[in-house]
Image (spheres, rainbow, N blue to C red):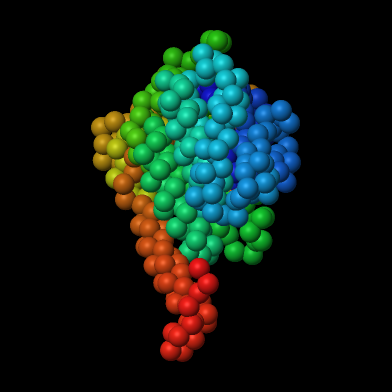
Amino acid sequence: MKLATIGVGNAGSKIIDRMLEFEEETGRNLCRHVMVINSARTDLAKPDYVPEDRRVLIGDTHQKAKGHGVGGDVAVGAEVAKHDIDEIRRTFDDIEIHEVDAILVAAGLGGGTGSGAGPVVIDELQKMYDEPVYGLGILPGKYEGGRPALNAARSLQSFVQKVDNLIAFDNDAWRSRGQTIEEGYEDMNRELAIRIVTLLAAGEIDETEVAENAMDSSDVMRTLDTSGISSIGYASTPIDREAEGLLDRFKNETTDPSEATDAAKIKGLVRRAVNSRLTLPCDVSSADRALVILSGPSEAIARKGVESARQWLEQEADTVEVLAGDDPRPNSDELAAVVLLSNVTETPRVDEIQDQAVDAQNKIQKLEDEREDDINDLITDDDNEIDPVI
Ligand code: GDP
């Protein structure tokens, strides 16, 4: 697929930056247009791969932001984006839309800029272009507390209503012990970038000769065309070409006695992708559609294995809408399986965030009421005998 990528807020921009890094490392060419949008000037300086002229500061003339961010306030994030909508629109004009198949907007949903400005940006993109707009949304960890959960619960609704599909990543599930939060984020961002790029870059090589069973961008887009929330599974295995005699062996695939083993390996890899940590843990059988891509040298992708993996996934996901194909990467030293579970409806973490958000909202309301009473008590005399001036 050819993609225009837009990171909104700090987390969104960092993810886009890691996607560009992984693309460069693996010789892919997915992100044809890149832009990051932020209300905090300091965060805009962070990316390593996003060109300087593709970084957009919003809210520098807005009284509540002034280039210093929106303080985790989702309403201010949205306000600032609306305030600067003309400038945002102008930067979109640069996107040569005939060059891309879709647009991806990445954001952390627990903060203020990504979660608030993200939906405003998406609204504008949907108005301007016919191409699908996908979201990549990071759900905050439970450990972050009530405010990020409330931001995320609200923003999730807006994202899902506005995008063609929201691919979700759950920080809670990916948190590992013994790391600082920043170290943890570095690892998570890398893992997410690998998954999203491996998935969306399939079908990107349409100019060159491609294998018969190659996955096409339109297959990925069809699977994403469900309007819901999606999760990605991934597993990879190194290929030692010489040790395995891979290239010679596959020249004569039909008569090779090791064919069955190779097919079993493929199926095993796909199972591992589905059964290991998903970007958003969910009940696989609640998926509406699914897709599996085997990415690596064509000789290493046993046809029978792909077909039996597809059949297995059809049962697991309990849907007939399962596509499977290859993403030929002749120079790759590994074979990767990436699985897209589209429109998953059983995700415990989303329910948890909503519970945490309702608690937080009630607590915030209670504190506001109490504070108002306390101020009133303080400034009025006991018998209410004194009147204010005006
Ligand atoms: P914003 O700039 O106001 O949108 O806020 P941030 O992007 O800094 O943070 C929003 C949320 O994103 C936080 O509550 C975290 O849950 C998450 N987050 C922040 N940075 C990262 C990161 O580098 N990786 C991941 N996975 N999540 C992050």
**Residue visible at 66% across and 37% down in the picture:** 57
Residue 158 point in image, percent of width and height = 40, 43
**Residue sitting at 34 percent across and 44 percent down?**
344
Q: Is residue 285 visible?
A: no
- Residue nearer the viewer, 166 or 371: 371
Q: Is residue 141 visible?
A: yes
Position of residue 386 relative to residue 264, above or below, is below
Residue 320 percent coordinates (x, y): 25, 32
Above or below, comparing residue 79 to residue 289 in the picture: below
- Above or below, 372 relative to 81: below
Q: Where is residue 323, by image quadrant?
A: top left
Q: Nearer the viewer, residue 226 or 111?
A: 111
- Place of residue 165 in the rendered image (x, y in percent of width and height, measured from the top left): 40, 35
Q: Nearer the viewer, residue 328 or 80?
A: 80
Tell me where residue 190 appears, x and y as whole percent: 61, 43
- Nearest to the observer: residue 359 or residue 188: 359
Q: Is residue 248 left or right of residue 351?
A: right
Instruction: Give the quarter of the image for residue 271.
Output: top left
* Quarter location, residue 167: top left
Image point 42% across, 67% down: which residue?
Answer: 365
